[in-house]
Amino acid sequence: MKTASIIGGGAAGFFAAIRLAELRNDIKVKLYEKSPQVLGKVRVSGGGRCNVTHHCLDPIALVKFYPRGQKSLIGPFTRFGPKDTIYWFEQRGVELKIESDGRMFPITDDSATIVDCLVNSAQEVGVEINLQKGIEEFSPIENGVRGWKLVFLDGTEEVVDYLMIATGSSDLIWKQLRKLKIKISDPVPSLFTFNIKDERLTDLLGISFPNSKVKVVGTKLEASGPLLITHWGLSGPGILKVSSFGAKELHAMKYKFQLQLNFLPQFNQESLFIELNNLKYINSKKKIFGFSPFTEIPKRFWMKLLATSDIPENLNWADLTNKHFRKLAAELTFAIYEVNGKSTFKDEFVACGGIDLEEIDLKTMASKKYENLFFAGEVMDVDAVTGGFNFQNAWTSGWISGSEMGK
């Protein structure tokens, strides 16, 4: 009986193993995971709810959420996309729901639902799951034509017919691949939040804004979306999108740059200045500290903004001058914050970089240089913004690689 080894017990590895075992009962499928449990990222994704995919069903629209590999991914997503993912889980008794922003979760709101589905599906089709079994090195036998020799960290060895690498971001694996002359794009963090120490954000932990525009000064990097003040600085979809699309550029800056914020993107400085003057007459007898005229601006942030703008607490709206309004308009639509460092987004570490897509036949997820060698998931130079897109890449590449090994 032929054998296939899947290295990596994450989303991509499980999808490939299950698909291959479903297609071929004459191939022994073995899955190896170096940690004590499988599907670690699945467990923590979405705050423990598991953001399975995104309800963006058009491949051309879908690839726009992937900073690297956009055009290359249209074909794979046409072959197996979010619609197929939804059906795959439904066929196994897992119903997914769509949230207002398009993210999709199991109706149980529990990542264990997805973990159990994958583990049970793998066991049902005879996949052998091996825990705490990390790989140390692998080498092709006659360029992979006669299979692959594996050496594990515990000193054991194995010869297999097919090898699939689905280890995610792994320096050890990338080092092994470089030895095989497979080109690796240097990995750098992606999908991170910004560290900012600024009086304007102090003691405002948890305050959010429904729609803000963020821009990295001196670059073309910008995005819009909800914004969240954290104990270390700023987070939220807009920040995460900029960090994802600008992963390599921001790394080159050593994560030190200026961030321009517009908390009211329906205005620019001049139009907001005019609006504030209009509000002055409408609310002339109201205290400036007691009344925030914009529903998008939380009261605590409004009061902090007034304080840091040196506007006295006892003033009525009628008492404010054009100088006051110029200052407020600038702070609300063109505020500059100094970013000094980054933080990982929750527990979901994502890196851009990995196996250069030119090394991979994306119709099969196979190596172009070696036979019987396949790849899937984040070990490749593919990553996306938050919202279920990274998992969709895992499901897609895993399913395709499993299908092609099955041929």
Image (cartoon, rainbow, N blue to C red):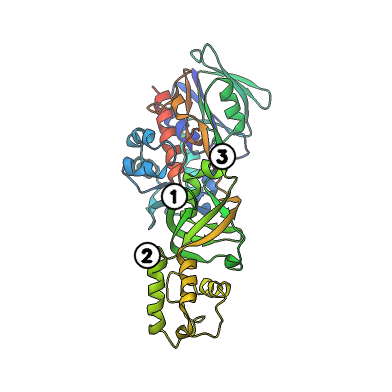
Measure the alpha-carbon separation of dots 3 and 2: 34 Å
Query: First in sequence: mark 3 or mark 2?
Result: 3
Query: First in sequence: mark 3 or mark 1?
Result: 3
Tell which residue pokes out farthest to the right in this image: 155
Residue 341's spot in the image, x, y percent? 61, 51
| Amino acid bearing label 1 | Gly
User: Residue 226 got which mark?
Assistant: none
- Residue 118 vs 267, above or below: the answer is above
User: Residue 266 got which mark?
Assistant: 2
Q: Secondary structure at mark 3?
A: strand
Q: Secondary structure at mark 2?
A: loop
Q: Are marks 3 and 2 in contact (CB under 8 Å)?
A: no
Residue 216's spot in the image, x, y percent? 49, 52
Residue at (50% x, 82% y) in the render: 290
Query: First in sequence: mark 1 or mark 2?
Result: 2
Q: Residues within 10 Å of mark 2 (few under 14, many from 20)?
A: few
Q: Nearer the viewer, residue 53 or 196?
A: 196
| Amino acid bearing label 3 | Val
- Residue 37 vs 344, above or below: the answer is above
Tell which residue pokes out farthest to the top in this image: 142
The mark closer to the camera, 3 or 2, is: 2
- Residue 228 vs 29, above or below: the answer is below
Task: Quickly name the residue at label 3.
Answer: 188
The mark closer to the camera, 3 or 1, is: 3
Residue 176 appearing in the image: yes
Residue at (50% x, 75% y) in the render: 299
Measure the alpha-carbon separation of dots 1 and 2: 25 Å
Task: Quickly name the residue at label 1.
Answer: 387
Measure the alpha-carbon separation of dots 3 and 1: 20 Å
